[in-house]
Image (cartoon, helix red, strand yellow):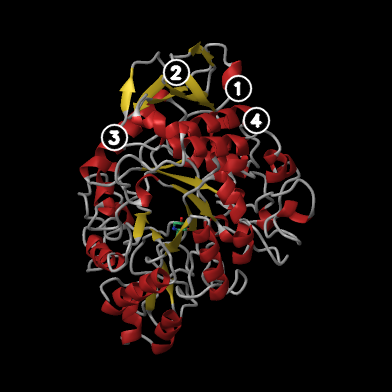
Amino acid sequence: MSDLLDHATTPSSPPATTPDPWWRQAVVYQVYPRSFADSNGDGTGDLPGITARVPHLVSLGVDAVWLSPFYPSALADGGYDVDDHRDVDPAIGTLEQFDEMVATLHAAGIKVVVDIVPNHSSNRHRWFRDALAAGPGSPERERYVFARGRGEHGELPPSDWTAVFGGPAWEPVGDGEWYLHTFAPEQPDWNWDHPEVHEDFLTTLRFWADRGVDGFRVDVAHALVKDMSSPLPTAAELAADDLPDGAHRFWDRDEVHEVYRAWRAVFDEYDPPRTAVAEAWVATHRRARYASPEGLGQAFNFDLLRSDFDAASFRRVVEENLRLAAESGTSSTWVLSNHDVVRHVSRYGLPDGMDEAARARWLLSGGTDPAPDLERGARRARAATAFLLALPGSAYLYQGEELGLPEVADLDAAVLQDPTWLRSGHVDKGRDGCRVPLPWTAEGPSHGFGPGPSHLPQPSWFAAHAADVQDRDPRSTLSAYREALAWRRRLRTGEELVFEDAPEGVVRFRRPGGWTCVTNFTTRAVPLPPGRVVLSSGAPADELGGELPGETTVWLLPAD
Ligand code: NOJ
């Protein structure tokens, strides 16, 4: 019997080799704090709510949680408009409650990662208010990206750039100057050429690291540094296909890596060193720069999230990302859902080939045109998740995916909170449908989210997905996640993977020690390869009858 199998049958035995840093193959669970659990009934999730739900995270078997922003914020962008990076929003809790949450998570063996938002602050940040009050030419304005408008009185924006959420990227302040906001107008961009901005972020990193935080998720890590030299190019010039790497005025500039080298020095002041993962929506070949050991160390790879449920695409994504990760000395990351995208149960239930624009039109139809096949979406989602969890590297899960939640696609326009809805001129409903507060219980106000209402309305069908219902059902998605995470932990092995021959539409790969994962992406059954099935994303192993059904993943160990 191999080392791996010895280890597999005695899960508590120590790994045979020196353990890698915890993050390299961790399962990280993303908590969107306002929608996770509400302890006081005000309709907003909070830190004591998270602390109270640590048993759920333990039974799920995650290694770490990543908390989306919980900082003071007017919620112009779900908390990514930060008033003060070194405090907790009173609606979410206090610093003491943060410490209690960290202590409870740590006592349960779960690491804590917090979100750092370095491209912009909110327009309520003290330094931005100082900048507005101090006026043009003042040192206070230099911490942000202000520029004089065009036209005799500065009445026209400095350039025709558009913001990510729609509308112009410049906002006038009434004295001939405009400020840049890559996202919403309430999110003024920092000027990363300013030493005080650098220093302030180093202080923020130390502030949380000193409170026991283990790592950081870095928001739009590929923004920050900008070239604002005159003349500013037009939006069309910036969008040119032949723009060389690093030449864009505000995305993915090479200088941004100097920022992360300084951050690395701070991470390495701690023992163990603090970790980071970059959210960088850059071309695959540029991602390694963010993930380098001298920089943030790891970067999100959204390639699976952007792929259809398709054997060739999944295999290509895995091959390319493992090669890139190895080249830059990091481990790969894998993601199927997060707080910015349509949940993967719904994506996989929609026709293949739909892009983001098509999904935005689908949301606009209230999720009816086309009608998703949610049974199929759930089947494929479980198969894709089991595939992802068998890969070397770290897996990022988004709250609620363990309950198999589909997108809430029919939220009424009147309740939408995402700035995208307004800024896009009511064309893009935005991301609220994946941020609806979690159903913990079938009964009760807000399905157990809290003792009161929920800040986004939950549909009645949430009852069937409630954690307490799934807890009792060995065939539920929650049980499937628990089982997969438990087996993943037991089978934890070296970061290698070898693809093996498989029929058309089937992907089969082996991990060191004989752990094999096979996913049938087609709709027809294929013969099961030899081995002992320890995990199935569909029917239980003893019901498979020698076949691997369509849209199903199994994990196999060598037969005894
Ligand atoms: C990326 C975050 O994931 C998203 O939610 C946010 O709106 C933007 N960055 C701006 O901070």
* Residue under label 1: 539
Q: Please, what is the three-letter code of the amino acid marked with disc 2?
A: Asp
Q: Please, what is the three-letter code of the amino acid marked with disc 4?
A: Arg
Q: Secondary structure at mark 3?
A: helix
Q: Are marks 1 and 2 in contact (CB under 8 Å)?
A: no
Q: Who's the residue at 30% across and 38% down the image? A: 321
The CA distance from mark 2 to mark 3 is: 34 Å
**Where, quadrant-wise, is the N terminus in this rendering?**
top left
* Residue under label 4: 475
The CA distance from mark 3 to mark 4 is: 34 Å
Give neighbour class at mark 2: few <14, some 14-19, many 20+ (Cα, 10 Å).
few
The CA distance from mark 1 to mark 2 is: 22 Å
Give neighbour class at mark 4: few <14, some 14-19, many 20+ (Cα, 10 Å).
some
Dot 1 beta carbon under 8 Å from ligand 1: no
N-term mark: 3 or 1: 3
Q: Quadrant of residue 425?
A: bottom right
**Where, quadrant-wise, is the C terminus in this rendering?**
top left
N-term mark: 1 or 2: 1
* Residue under label 2: 560
Q: Please, what is the three-letter code of the amino acid marked with disc 3?
A: Glu
Q: Quadrant of residue 538?
A: top right
* Residue under label 3: 320
The CA distance from mark 4 to mark 2 is: 26 Å
Q: Who's the residue at 34% across and 33% down the image? A: 318
Q: Is residue 341 left or right of residue 506?
A: right
Residue in front for this viewpoint, 302 or 477 = 477
Q: Is residue 5 left or right of residue 342?
A: left
Q: Please, what is the three-letter code of the amino acid marked with disc 1?
A: Ala
Image vertical order of residue 12 relative to residue 194, above or below? above
- The percent position of residue 136, horizontal first and vertical second, equals 35, 85
The CA distance from mark 3 to mark 1 is: 31 Å
Residue in front for this viewpoint, 295 or 344 = 295
